[in-house]
């Protein structure tokens, strides 16, 4: 039997624990049981649950205490905690949401709703874990900016989708009277009204006998624009089957028993805060990916990017039959600038040189800083004569205008030496392997050495393979 995850069940009543274990084990979950708050930290550290189901009241605490204890555990702060409340106890239901519980289920609950809610929460946690792993696995060795804290927007944008205009107006008024949101409502028959404006932080969708609400949930969750938007469904009754269907189609939460402004507001607060945390993680991940390809001083691409880009250029050349150029460039006597004017001046020269080379090259190829004062240039779809002219343009961009130094009012003359190597005139896939690209780089390096030996401030082209 394949176990799909570990669920911790906390309840002081043994029959409740046994019933839940039977339901969950039948659905291929591994179930761990506990009776009270005492000893919970050690229990969760040992069992590493993926989700916690806890009675609203334990012999020595509450569901809120369980949530606080779980959050304190390293690596488990994102474990969903669901409170199990008594039937028709609306106050307990709202209190649990106010205390930060991830959801509330009331006895007696059907297997379908219980399992749908578990699936939904485990999917949500999997997203969080994927983002955490991706962020933590970013390469080190680059300048790390201070993390930007992204908080829920002061005025979150919330759209309401209802089946009738009367319902939309009533829901809008009820929510607007209690909390200031940037609220708008639309008929479900006019979904374009939601998709054509600014992307909402959350959408409250009326569910009912008509299947349009369920279809809209699936539609919104599948679209690129709204796939991260919080979706909350509202059912006029306690239809567990429809609630389960809504969760499986992408709803983040479902409110049973009709519209309750308090419950919706609490769920909006909790879900929008969670969305803000995930948005922060996505921004951090994108920034980390971008920075892993960028040299932090000059803003040019780094060696890692350069090697990947050359590989792509080579494969593209094999498809088109066009040749490409590799250049290695080195600022002449750069150590003398550092020694004579200081490292701050040296950094300034590197930054300006990078900008000049990038401007000289334009969009014809890439420039990467691959060492202290060393640069690599890759140019696709170029003839030898074009590549040589381009290399001389880069060389002139450095030597023709002195470089101003910071805080000194001084200017320094700088020159650069460039080694150029062309690929085969009509490269084949065999000519564009990683090994052959590496040989081209070695040839360009020998051409660079020849330019240095010949007096510097010039371009040398390597006419034969390394």
Image (cartoon, rainbow, N blue to C red):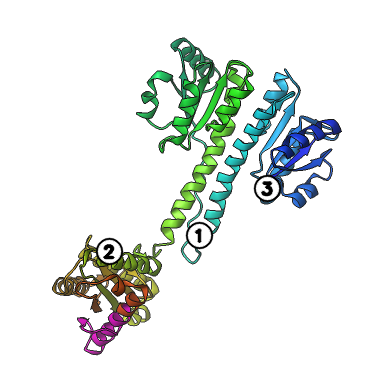
Q: Nearer the viewer, residue 330 or 364?
A: 364
Q: Nearer the viewer, mark 2 or mark 1?
A: 2
Circle 2 sits in a helix, a strand or a loop, which is it? helix
Please give the name of the residue rendered at 25% of the width and 64% of the height, measured from the top-left corner: 319
The question of residue 117 being in magenta is answered with no
**For the residues marked 2 and 3, what is the alpha-carbon distance in whole angstroms?**
45 Å
Circle 3 sits in a helix, a strand or a loop, which is it? loop
Q: Nearer the viewer, residue 426 or 334?
A: 426
Total marks drawn?
Answer: 3
* Among the two numbered marks 2 and 1 on one chain, the one whose residue lies closer to the N terminus: 1
Horizontally, residue 347 falls left or right of residue 421, namely right
Q: Residues within 10 Å of mark 1 (few under 14, many from 20)?
A: some
Furthest toward the front, the residue is 1
Q: Is residue 35 above or below residue 373?
A: above
Q: Residues within 10 Å of mark 3 (few under 14, many from 20)?
A: few
Across and down, in percent, residue 142 comes to: 46, 64
Across and down, in percent, residue 217 comes to: 49, 28
Please give the name of the residue rendered at 83% of the width and 38% of the height, measured from the top-left corner: 36
Q: Nearer the viewer, residue 318 or 413?
A: 318
* Among the two numbered marks 1 and 3 on one chain, the one whose residue lies closer to the N terminus: 3
Q: Which residue position holds label 1?
A: 138
Q: Nearer the viewer, mark 1 or mark 3?
A: 3
Per the rendered image, the range of residues in magenta is 441-466
- Residue 316 circle label: 2
Furthest toward the top, the residue is 166
**For the residues marked 1 and 3, what is the alpha-carbon distance in whole angstroms?**
32 Å
Q: Is residue 97 above or below residue 178?
A: below
Across and down, in percent, residue 28 comes to: 69, 42
Q: Which residue position holds label 3?
A: 2
């Amino acid at each position: 039997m394949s176990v799909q995850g570990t669920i911790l069940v906390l309840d002081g009543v043994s029959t409740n624990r046994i019933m839940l274990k039977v339901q969950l084990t039948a659905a291929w979950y591994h179930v761990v049981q506990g009776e009270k708050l005492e000893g919970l930290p050690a229990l969760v550290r040992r069992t590493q649950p993926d989700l916690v189901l806890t009675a609203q009241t334990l012999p020595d605490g509450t569901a809120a205490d369980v949530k606080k204890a779980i959050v304190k555990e390293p690596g488990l702060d994102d474990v969903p905690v669901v409170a199990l409340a008594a039937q028709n106890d609306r106050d307990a239901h709202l209190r649990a949401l106010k205390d930060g519980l991830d959801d509330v289920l009331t006895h007696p609950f059907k297997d379908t709703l219980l399992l749908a809610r578990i699936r939904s929460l485990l999917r949500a946690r999997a997203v969080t874990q994927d983002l955490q792993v991706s962020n933590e696995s970013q390469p080190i060795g680059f300048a790390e900016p201070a993390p930007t804290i992204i908080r829920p927007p002061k005025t979150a944008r919330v759209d309401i989708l209802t089946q009738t205009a009367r319902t939309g107006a009533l829901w809008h008024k009820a929510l607007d009277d209690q909390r200031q949101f940037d609220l708008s409502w639309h008929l479900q028959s006019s979904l374009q009204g939601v998709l054509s404006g600014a992307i909402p932080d959350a959408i409250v969708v009326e569910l009912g006998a008509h299947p349009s609400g369920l279809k809209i949930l699936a539609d919104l969750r599948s679209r690129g624009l709204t796939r991260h938007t919080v979706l909350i469904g509202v059912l006029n009754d306690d239809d567990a089957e429809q609630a389960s269907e809504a969760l499986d189609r992408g709803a983040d939460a479902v409110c049973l028993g009709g519209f309750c402004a308090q419950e919706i507001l609490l769920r909006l607060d909790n879900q929008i805060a969670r969305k803000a945390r995930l948005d922060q993680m996505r921004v951090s991940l994108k920034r980390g990916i971008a920075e892993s390809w960028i040299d932090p001083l000059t803003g040019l691409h780094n060696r890692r990017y350069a090697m990947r880009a050359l590989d792509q250029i080579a494969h593209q050349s094999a498809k088109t039959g066009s040749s490409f150029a590799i250049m290695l460039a080195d600022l002449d006597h750069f150590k003398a600038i550092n020694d004579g004017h200081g490292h701050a001046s040296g950094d300034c020269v590197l930054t300006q040189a990078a900008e000049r080379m990038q401007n000289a090259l334009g969009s014809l190829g890439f420039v990467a800083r691959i060492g202290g004062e060393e640069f690599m240039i890759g140019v696709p779809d170029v003839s030898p004569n074009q590549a040589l002219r381009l290399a001389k343009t880069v060389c002139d961009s450095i030597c023709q205008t002195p470089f101003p130094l910071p805080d000194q009012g001084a200017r320094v003359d700088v020159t650069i030496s460039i080694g150029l190597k062309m690929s085969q005139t009509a490269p084949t896939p065999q000519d564009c392997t990683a090994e052959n690209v590496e040989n081209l780089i070695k040839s360009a390096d020998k051409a660079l050495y020849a330019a240095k030996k010949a007096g510097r401030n010039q371009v040398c082209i390597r006419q034969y393979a390394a």
